[in-house]
């Protein structure tokens, strides 16, 4: 049976806030299945989140790329592991580009709100699947 981790933050006076609960303890090994984001008040600009497994983002590095019009050279931006809820949207269900690192038994998983984008009352769900059979995966 899959395990669902739910993180929530009602309002924050700034950005870079840890969402409640502060962390989940992993009782078994899990693989990542999906991420779902909901906001009661949709953000005015992209709201940005990151989920960490023992301090390491669970998402793959994505690098932004652009072209310098004057020189024709490719410009590579900084690596980014965040996920976002697009401006104007109240929800998004995504099976994001997860890294290939297993969530190990005994690790702690937590979620940070990086930028509210002007939205409020956020809930982030992380669905996990147990790697070994016989695990209940219940919270």
Image (cartoon, rainbow, N blue to C red):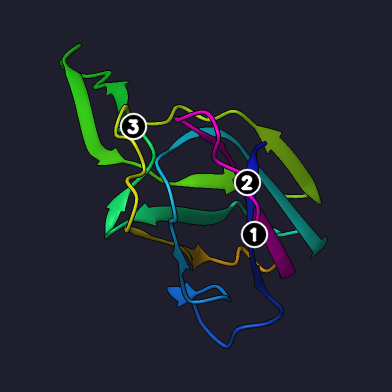
Percent position (x, y) of residue 113? Answer: 51, 66
Figure check: 23 above or below 82: below
Most foreground residue, 21 or 12: 21
Nearer to us of marks 3 and 1 is 1
In which quadrant is the C terminus drawn?
A: bottom right
Circle 2: element type: strand
User: In whole angstroms, how far apart are the C-alphas of marks 2 and 3?
Assistant: 21 Å
- Which residue bears the numbered disc 1? 139
Magenta span = 121-139
Percent position (x, y) of residue 58? Answer: 37, 42
Within-10-Å neighbours for mark 3: few <14, some 14–19, many 20+: some
Q: Earlier in the sequence, mark 3 or mark 1?
A: 3
Residue at 59% from the left image edge and 28% from the top image edge: 95
Nearer to us of marks 2 and 3 is 2
Q: Earlier in the sequence, mark 2 or mark 1?
A: 2
Q: Earlier in the sequence, mark 2 or mark 3?
A: 2
Percent position (x, y) of residue 66? Answer: 31, 23
Looking at this view, name the residue that lies furthest to the bottom.
Answer: 13
Q: Would residue 67 be counted in the magenta stretch? A: no
User: In whole angstroms, how far apart are the C-alphas of marks 2 and 1?
Assistant: 7 Å
Residue at 54% from the left image edge and 40% from the top image edge: 135
Question: Is label 3 in contact with label 1 (beta carbons under 8 Å)?
Answer: no
Residue at 71% from the left image edge and 59% from the top image edge: 44
Question: Is label 2 in contact with label 1 (beta carbons under 8 Å)?
Answer: yes
Figure check: 139 above or below 67: below
Q: Would residue 131 be counted in the magenta stretch? A: yes
Percent position (x, y) of residue 124? Answer: 65, 56
Residue at 25% from the left image edge and 38% from the top image edge: 79
User: In whole angstroms, how far apart are the C-alphas of marks 3 and 1?
Assistant: 26 Å
Within-10-Å neighbours for mark 1: few <14, some 14–19, many 20+: few
- Which residue bears the numbered disc 2? 3
- Which residue bears the numbered disc 3? 60
């Amino acid at each position: 049976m899959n395990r669902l981790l739910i993180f929530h933050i009602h309002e924050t006076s700034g950005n870079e806030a840890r969402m409640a609960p502060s962390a989940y303890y992993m009782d078994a090994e899990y693989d990542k299945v999906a991420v779902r984001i909901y906001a009661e008040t949709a953000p005015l600009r992209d709201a940005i989140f990151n989920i960490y497994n023992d301090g390491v983002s669970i998402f793959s590095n994505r690098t932004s790329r652009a072209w310098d019009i004057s020189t024709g050279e490719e410009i590579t931006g900084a690596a980014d592991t965040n996920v976002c809820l697009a401006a104007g949207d109240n929800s998004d269900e995504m099976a994001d580009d997860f890294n290939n690192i297993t969530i190990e038994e005994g690790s702690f998983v937590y979620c940070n709100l990086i930028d509210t984008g002007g939205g409020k009352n956020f809930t982030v769900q992380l669905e996990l699947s147990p790697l070994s059979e016989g695990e209940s995966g219940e919270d």
